[in-house]
Amino acid sequence: MENDVHRSVSSRAARRNQHQQTKDPEEGGLYGGKLSQEYSMKILWRRGFIRLILTGGIIWMLLILTVLLFHIWSCQSSLAFFAALCNKDSKVYGMLNTMGLVAPPHRCAIPVADDPNSVVIPEKRTPDKVIQRLSYIMEDKISTNGNQSSPLFGGHQTWKERDESFKIKPDMKVHCGFIQGGGEEMAQKDIEYVKKCRLVLATGIFDAYDTPHQPSNISKRSESLFCFLMVVDEVSLQFIKDNVTVREDNDGGQWVGIWRLIPLKHQPYDEPRRNGKVPKILTHRLFPQAEYSIWIDGKMELTVDPLLLLERYLWRGKNTFAIAQHKHHRNVYEEADSNKRRKRYARPLIDLQMKIYRYEGMEPWDEHKNTLSDVPEGAIIIREHTALNNLFSCLWFNEVHLFTPRDQLSFGYVVYRLRGAFNFFMFPNCEYNSIFVLHPHNREHSSKVEWAKTISELKKHPELIESKGGLGLWTPYPGNLDLVVLPPVARTSKAG
């Protein structure tokens, strides 16, 4: 019986333990389930947040890539609207070009001589058979009614004076910049230095738009024969001193590598691009003792020995003036249309300049003309400083002074007005692309006048109008331009 009682007590204890064990897991399972569910939600939210960030980042990268690809495509497009969106001077385009995502320009080998030391420099200059004496107007006309403004760098040229300047005579006196009191002043130490320069390689930087680029592949002979001159304004000079090592010689001359800096004080124009046309076109006025000169834009790094360039483009073919053919355009009216699409200057003022040219008989280019093109690539100019070439440069600059600063629009017009008297060598664009390495500008350039769409808009906002350049666009023209219809433009090429 005692054993029965003992078994009964053991059974109850066992059942109690079993019940307790059953109860505890149920309570613990309920509490543990709540923790597990909260933990799972946290993990789920954390993973979802990470996926959201990754998805957003991928979408953002795809959006940037789409924009970049669209930018590349627009720069290659022949459609007017899309080509107008391309800005080849932007840092974005420069970055894409550096990455190899932009189609490189077409290049071909330049048939230069093998060795600069073997180049024979002509002993005699090209004789001036057409113009015996060329002189320049140095004083601006003073108005008798008291309304005359201060002297302009290019002078207040009348329409009659402009027309007469195209009539070639043995003895000529023309406007050619550097009017007294008009600005663009060189220090005396630089004046003395350039007097010794017979062969000049020149470039220029204005408004801190570019950084100096040292030319490469320069022979010892060219180093001894050429003056390497970099013309700068005061803003660019300070920028260069802040960012590049500038050394000073015993005479006070300032140097950046091979380049002798030629600072010009008191810039003549409000528009830096117009200021840059002075050393580019009027090289013979800045360096009057020079016999030959090569101009390259500030964004370029020359990669061909300059003596080889003179031999290839001037001496070999007995030329005195050489410039490259434009990549896309031969017709000046097509180039004007491209400038409007790219907002290179106020569209109504470009139209006005073209209407004047059309009124004065400028025909669109075709294969029957005696020139390869009416539109050059003006970033490289190679010339002998003959009287006729100097006259052409003066007349070319006068157009830039009177109208828009887009010198490619006026080059062919001046050639046309000289009626075949001016001969030049226009070399292939693929050779032009092989002369240099192109660097991006420090920043994008834009002036307010470039965005004006109508004449009324300009009149309503006179602050958009340049005060010292392009005044011919605001001077009454002695002809009825209302009847002029500009030639149609096919737009068969890119807007570049």
Image (cartoon, grey):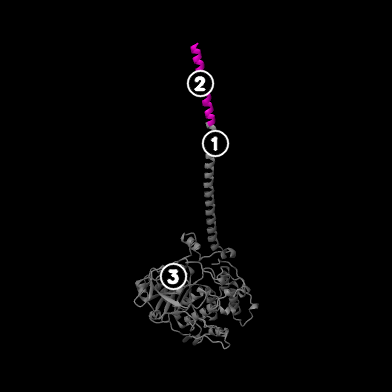
Q: Which amino acid does label 1 sit on?
A: Lys
383 displayed left or right of 67: left
First to last magenta residue range: 1-27
Q: Which residue lies furthest to the top in this view?
A: 1
**What residue is pinned by disc 2?**
14
Residue 242 seen? yes
User: Residue 337 appears in which quarter of the rendering?
Assistant: bottom right
Element under disc 2: helix
379 displayed left or right of 160: left
Residue 324 part of the magenta segment: no
User: Residue 487 appears in which quarter of the rendering?
Assistant: bottom right
* Marks 3 and 2, the one that precedes in the sequence: 2
**What residue is pinned by disc 1?**
34
**What residue is pinned by disc 3?**
239
Residue 279 percent across, percent down from the top left: 46, 77
User: Residue 285 appears in which quarter of the rendering?
Assistant: bottom left
Q: Image point 54% across, 76% down: which residue?
A: 410
Residue 364 seen? no
Residue 18 part of the magenta segment: yes
Above or below for 9 versus 241: above
* Marks 1 and 3, the one that precedes in the sequence: 1
Count of numbered circles in the view: 3
Residue 304 percent across, percent down from the top left: 41, 69
Pointers 1 and 3 in contact (CB under 8 A)? no
Q: How many angstroms separate mark 1 from mark 3 (CA)?
A: 68 Å
Q: Which amino acid does label 2 sit on?
A: Ala
